[in-house]
């Protein structure tokens, strides 16, 4: 059983790697020593330490295991697309040790039983840790508040209404007030459902030329303005999920400057793709929220570099092939992103949009802090969640190298640079590129 393996891990020495731990301002070549599933020392071995396994990390980066703020593992309810077992393997192969699952499973995560089911199945898979967000409203219906206290007690890291709208601003105010009483972070999808009006692309020249129903920038910015007003009113700690417009990022930056308890993230595809990529009705680029302008893409990169956007996530949404077939508006939105999160992040470094230490911060301690979890660090006595990657290793993303069951990605066939070679979860090796090759 997974639990027995977790309770009796080996003593491991990772030697010769460049250790980067932004949470502790560490960036140096040194060894890492692991025992009982935890980091016991850096640089110098503890007295009497005798490694049962050694990992040569020469030429590689050793960093905390990545923390992904949004990954739909499709279980329970949509196992035809993917399962916890398949997506846990994909996460491990990408150096991701903690996944955050939104509440829009089937059944919805609005009871402790569903949260517990996901936790137990993740433990059984034994490849990655999965934390859940509880539903803000019952069944994500948008009107009746969920039992947030019970969801917090069940281990939910926060609450969210996923992509579903709330009935009105009064319901949102009551929900934020209720969450604040339990010190829960509310994860917000910034979208005015009425302005979005069932659109499927950014409202602009490309959507107009293609005859696609558009979603205006104001659908996001109006929602951010409303949400910020209610955050100030209620004092709740809030996180904006996957912003797509430069204007929204600017509004969040101003709120942060004024002392509002708000954070925000961006998903990797929005830093590379834009509305231009849907020009030939490519359903692999059908995302909700939609891909915006090239200017928005650059402003999001700038906001990530400045720290306004404290986390970079995959927004992983695996689909079966049929989900992406048909007319663009009728296809299901989303990209399978676990396999590409690390290499797409490293491409930002290659393009000098972000330095390596800050990238790792946005993939580790940044998202861990948003979730309030004690991960994303290589501190002594921290859980030994570790990603080792070779930043110079080039490889091609194809059906043979993708670990996720969902192959829906516009990056298919692309040559990528940088690949995870080893992943450890609580001191247990859960992935090795040598074994996968």
Image: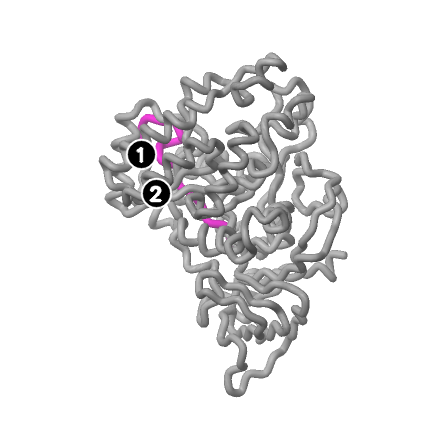
Residue 60 on the magenta span: no
What is the total number of numbered labels drawn onto the structure image? 2
Decide which of 159, 255 is in the foreground and name it: 255
The residue that mark 1 highlights is 228
Q: Is residue 391 visible?
A: yes
Relative to 96, does residue 150 appear above or below in the rendering? above
Q: Is residue 128 or residue 107 the one in the foreground?
A: 128
The x, y position of residue 199, in whole percent, is 51, 18
Q: Residue 221, image x and y in percent?
A: 40, 27
Q: Residues within 10 Å of mark 2 (few under 14, many from 20)?
A: many
Q: Please provide the residue range marked out in magenta.
A: 129-144
The alpha-carbon separation of the residues under discs 2 and 1 comes to 9 Å
Front residue of 1/399: it is: 399
**Looking at the rendering, in which quadrant would you find the C terminus?**
bottom right
Where in the figure is residue 158, as x and y percent of width and height? 37, 44
Determine crowd level at label 1: few under 14, some 14-19, many 20+ residues with C-alpha closer than 10 A. Answer: many
Image point (41%, 50%), residue name:
371
Give yes or no for contact between labels 2 and 1 (Cβ–Cβ under 8 Å).
yes
- Locate residue 334 relative to residue 41 in the image: left or right: right
Residue 330: image x %, image y %? 61, 19
Q: Is residue 235 toward the left or the right of residue 4 in the image?
A: left
Secondary element under disc 1, as helix, strand or loop, is: helix
Tell me if residue 65 comes above or below residue 116 in the rendering: below
Question: What's the residue at 44%, 61% (across, down)?
Answer: 23
Q: Which residue is mark 2?
A: 262
| Residue drawn 73% across the image and 56% down it | 436
Give the position of the N terminus as an image quadrant. bottom right
Q: Quadrant of residue 262?
A: top left
Closer to the chain start, of discs 2 and 1, is: 1
């Amino acid at each position: 059983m997974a639990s027995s393996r977790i309770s009796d891990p080996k003593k491991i020495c990772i030697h010769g790697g460049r250790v980067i731990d932004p949470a502790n301002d560490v960036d140096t070549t040194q060894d890492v020593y692991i025992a009982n599933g935890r980091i016991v020392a850096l640089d110098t071995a503890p007295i009497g330490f005798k490694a049962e396994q050694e990992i040569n990390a020469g030429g590689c980066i050793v960093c905390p295991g990545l923390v992904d703020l949004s990954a739909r593992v499709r279980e329970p309810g949509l196992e035809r697309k993917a399962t916890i077992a398949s997506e846990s393997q994909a996460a491990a192969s990408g150096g991701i040790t903690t996944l955050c699952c939104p509440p829009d499973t089937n059944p919805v995560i609005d009871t402790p039983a569903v949260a517990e089911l996901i936790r137990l199945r993740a433990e059984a898979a034994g490849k990655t840790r999965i934390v859940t967000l509880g539903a803000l409203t019952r069944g994500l219906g948008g009107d009746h508040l969920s039992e947030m206290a019970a969801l917090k007690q069940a281990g939910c890291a926060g609450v969210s209404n996923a992509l579903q709208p709330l009935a009105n601003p009064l319901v949102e105010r009551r929900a934020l007030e209720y969450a604040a009483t339990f010190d829960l972070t509310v994860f917000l999808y910034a979208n005015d459902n009425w302005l979005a009006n069932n659109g499927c692309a950014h409202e602009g020249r490309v959507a107009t030329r293609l005859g696609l129903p558009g979603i205006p920038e104001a659908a996001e910015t109006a929602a951010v303005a409303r949400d910020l007003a209610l955050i100030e009113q209620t004092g709740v700690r809030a996180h904006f999920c996957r912003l797509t417009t430069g204007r929204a990022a600017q509004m969040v930056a101003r709120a942060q400057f004024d002392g509002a308890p708000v954070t925000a993230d961006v998903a990797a595809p929005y830093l590379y793709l834009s509305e231009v990529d849907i020009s030939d009705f490519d359903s692999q680029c059908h995302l909700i929220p939609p891909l915006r302008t090239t200017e928005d893409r650059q402003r999001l990169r700038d906001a990530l570099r400045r720290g306004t956007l404290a986390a970079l996530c995959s927004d992983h949404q695996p689909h079966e092939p049929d989900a992406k077939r048909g007319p663009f508006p009728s296809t299901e939105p989303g990209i399978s992103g676990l396999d590409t999160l690390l290499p797409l992040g490293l491409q930002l470094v290659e393009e000098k949009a972000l330095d390596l230490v800050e990238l790792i911060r946005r993939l580790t301690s940044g998202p861990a802090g948003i979730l309030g979890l004690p991960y994303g660090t290589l501190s002594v006595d921290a859980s030994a969640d570790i990603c080792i990657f070779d930043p110079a290793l080039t490889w091609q993303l194809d059906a043979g190298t993708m670990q996720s069951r969902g192959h829906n990605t516009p990056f298919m066939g692309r040559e990528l640079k940088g690949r995870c070679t080893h992943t450890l979860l609580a001191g247990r090796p859960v992935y090795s590129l040598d074994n996968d090759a």
